[in-house]
Amino acid sequence: MPVTVTRTTITTTTSSSTTVGSARALTQPLGLLRLLQLISTCVAFSLVASVGAWTGPMGNWAMFTWCFCFAVTLIILIVELGGLQAHFPLSWRNFPITFACYAALFCLSSSIIYPTTYVQFLPHGRSRDHAIAATTFSCVACLAYATEVAWTRARPGEITGYMATVPGLLKVFETFVACIIFAFISDPTLYNQKPALEWCVAVYAICFILAGVTILLNLGECTNMLPIPFPTFLSGLALLSVLFYATAIVLWPLYQFDQRYQGQPRRSMDASCARTYAYMQPNTVCYWDRRLAVSILTGINLLAYVSDLVYSTRLVFVKV
């Protein structure tokens, strides 16, 4: 039984209408916006692929982002043109905006990471010019996806999918931030043999899984499979995540930067930072910078979960 939402009301429905496809879908503002997304991501990965300027983890991430966004946007356009929304395996009320939010965040990350950790180390020439142009088109794609999210999010009095509401969009943001945290703590030496830091890693993993499950339940229209009411699940999840992240925001900086707990309060104390700077190694982030980034991202996600909790308590579920 799918879930749909207004600003303060989540409505449970048992059926959905079938939308007839038409080429006119491409001439509507949203259709034109998706064409812009398609073209900008296609140009971005084509420019980079033509000169092979995507080696290393950061280059691979940027290439994956542009190819993935291009492929899914193409699928969405085909579904819209063919009027296949009712036959799509996922909830069409939730899928497009969920993808658009992820795509905006993905392209934003690529537009920042790719030029700062890869492009600046390329020698002047054709490869560098193509990489810079690709970054520009990545920024265009990011703006296009963000605009779609702004256009299609829930409005007062409008019935739409849960993922179009503020709590739904925050779930996307929370999982994305958690993924970045995982990338920064990919080296176990950052937290091994310190129970407090291992607990922080567990917090990031548990909250990520719970938020991911919420997204999947809505995309698959499986919220009625929960043993407890969906609004209770949402509120409990948000409260639990706030409590967990509140412990992490204290423990992670304390054990990483306080000398009483073998932490390093200054960047100059980390030998890996000195090596990275001296040799100007691309695609490399030293340990101290990783610790700082995780601390900042933990605070950002805590604020997101607090907002999620506040907005979730304002949602009212009704059946139609």
Image: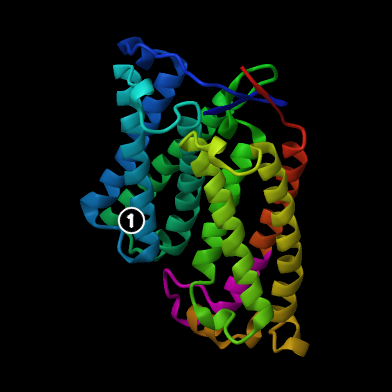
Q: Residue shown at 33%/17% (left/top)? A: 83
Return the residue found at the far left.
50
Residue 198 x/y as whole percent: 62, 77
Q: Residue shown at 74%/44% (left/top)? A: 309
Find the magenta span and give its range: 278-295
Q: Residue shown at 57%/34% (left/top)? A: 163
The residue that label 1 is drawn on is: 128
Q: Is residue 114 left or right of residue 210?
A: left
| Image-quadrant location for residue 124 | bottom left
Q: Is residue 297 left or right of residue 209?
A: right
Q: Main secondary structure of the magenta part?
A: helix
Q: How is the image coloured?
A: rainbow
156, 228: nearer the viewer = 228
309, 226: nearer the viewer = 226
Q: Amino acid at mark 1?
A: Arg
The secondary structure type at the circle numbered 1 is: helix
Residue 113 x/y as whole percent: 47, 57
| Image-quadrant location for residue 296 | bottom right
Residue 56 x/y as whole percent: 34, 66
Q: Residue 164 in magenta?
A: no
Return the residue found at the far front.
227
Whether residue 134 is situated above or below residue 271 in the rendered picture? above
273, 314: nearer the viewer = 314
Q: Residue shown at 45%/75% (left/top)? A: 280
Q: Is residue 102 left or right of residue 264?
A: left
Residue 188 x/y as whole percent: 51, 79
Q: Residue 287 in magenta?
A: yes
The answer to whether residue 302 shows anywhere in this view is: no
* Rendered-image quadrant of the C terminus: top right
